[in-house]
Image (cartoon, helix red, strand yellow):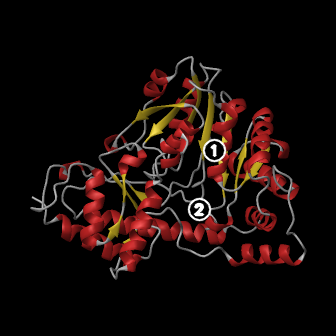
Amino acid sequence: MLSERVLNLAESETLKMARMARELRAIGHDVISLSLGEPDFDTPDHIKEAAYQALKEGYTKYTPVAGLPELTKAISEKFKRDNQLDYRPEQIVVSNGAKQTIYNLCQALLNPGDEVILFAPYWVSYLEIVKLSGGTPVCVYAGVAHDFKPTPQQLSDAITSKTKFVLFSSPCNPTGTVFTREELEAYANVLAQHEHVLVVSDEIYEFINFTHEHVSIGSFPQVKDRTITVNGFAKGFSMTGWRLGYMGAPKYIADACTKIQGQVTSGAASFSQKAGAVALMSDLAPTFAMREAFRERRDIVLSMLEEVPGIRANHPDGAFYVFPDVSSYFGKTDGHVTIQNADDFCDYVMSNAYVGLVSGTAFGDPNCFRLSYAASEEQLREAIRRLKEVLGRLR
């Protein structure tokens, strides 16, 4: 008999769509999968070389649970250099990906009944990790018309005596939204009035930001001592398989997360950490080149989506996603299938166009779908051509 915990846990929609794509390919269909949030670039050579060198030097053993000293020092310096954040090395915890960092935080901070405010749309795993940890998600929603940005008043209205922390990402997965300095300061001013509320800022897409200014909410003095900043190497350095994430936090929270991690996985891979330190402290030119390639793809996708009737998209300023509203298709049919919601929309597109998208339902917005443009220009053009064709059959 399985536990209630796992029975109540939703399957990751992104992984579900990836599985469907594999199954369709296995029976001969030409599937274009735009569902996974994974850069299609290789890890830069100098980072791979650092891992090779670490292996040659015997870095194949257990590491300190919170991370190798050279990496926590590099992260501390990176926070100062790029984010105006003052986290000492002992306030940093390195984990097996930023997802584990968020899981550690929820396990370390939440008791049954504690509330966590999520800006919706949110990354799929936020909701499930909060629930898995005994917390109660409280979603603050903003749609495409508002660039998916909740107002400070919405945030204020959601805070109660049970609120433990606020969790959001910028640049955002799934919307690509980037919060400006003024917008983050307005949130910080609200949170300054509620000293019991922590802030968890997921900045994993920091380096894929087309605005030329990434702002960390922890840099505002009114919330500086209550902010946990989450980041990692997967997106900006195309190191998804290296499983390496990190956070900076108040010392008591860092210690608690180290305690949790010590009983679950212990430290991240030793040679990954050695390579991570090199990635942070070396030339970021390859990262910026990837960013510019993503910018070009974004522009291609947006221009093509404008030619698809009934699709309404914002103008994402970061990450590598577009999150269009397709509610105008709800109730339409091709004579066999009727589209009732975004789940039906994505299933219809997969079954008829063999293009893998992810329903916005998983992200807290059932009117939208997520398209990842971490794919080649050729694939993107063909995918949207197919999308336009099959949607034209709906009446």
Q: Which quadrant of the view contains residue 274?
A: bottom right
Residue highlighted by disc 1: 102
Q: Is residue 100 left or right of residue 205?
A: right
Q: Position of residue 227 (x, y in %)?
A: 67, 35
| Image quarter in which the C terminus is found | bottom left
* Element assignment for label 2: loop
Residue at point 53%, 19% (across, down) = 160
Residue at point 62%, 43% (across, down) = 216
Residue highlighted by disc 2: 235
Residue at point 61%, 23% (across, down) = 192
Residue 359 is at least partly visible in this image: yes
Q: Earlier in the sequence, mark 2 or mark 1?
A: 1
Amino acid residing under circle 2? Lys
Q: Is residue 14 left or right of residue 222?
A: left
Q: Is residue 77 left or right of residue 345?
A: right
Residue 169 is at least partly visible in this image: no
Q: Which quadrant of the view contains residue 380?
A: bottom left
Q: Position of residue 223 (x, y in %)?
A: 66, 29
Amino acid residing under circle 1? Ile
For label 2, the crowd category at 10 Å Cα-Cα, with few meaning under 14, some 14 to 19 and many 20 or more, is many
Viewer-proximal residue among 293 and 395 = 395
Residue found at the far top of this picture: 161
Number of numbered discs overlaid on the protein picture: 2
Q: Which quadrant of the view contains residue 308?
A: bottom left
Using the numbered discs, state the Cα–Cα distance from disc 2 to disc 1 in whole angstroms.
Answer: 16 Å
For label 1, the crowd category at 10 Å Cα-Cα, with few meaning under 14, some 14 to 19 and many 20 or more, is many
119 is higher (above) or lower (below) than 76: above
Please identify, in this view, whether the residue under mark 2 or under mark 1 is nearer the observer.
1
Q: Position of residue 354 (x, y in %)?
A: 31, 72
Q: Mark on residue 157?
A: none
Q: Position of residue 100 (x, y in %)?
A: 66, 50
Q: Is residue 51 left or right of residue 323?
A: right
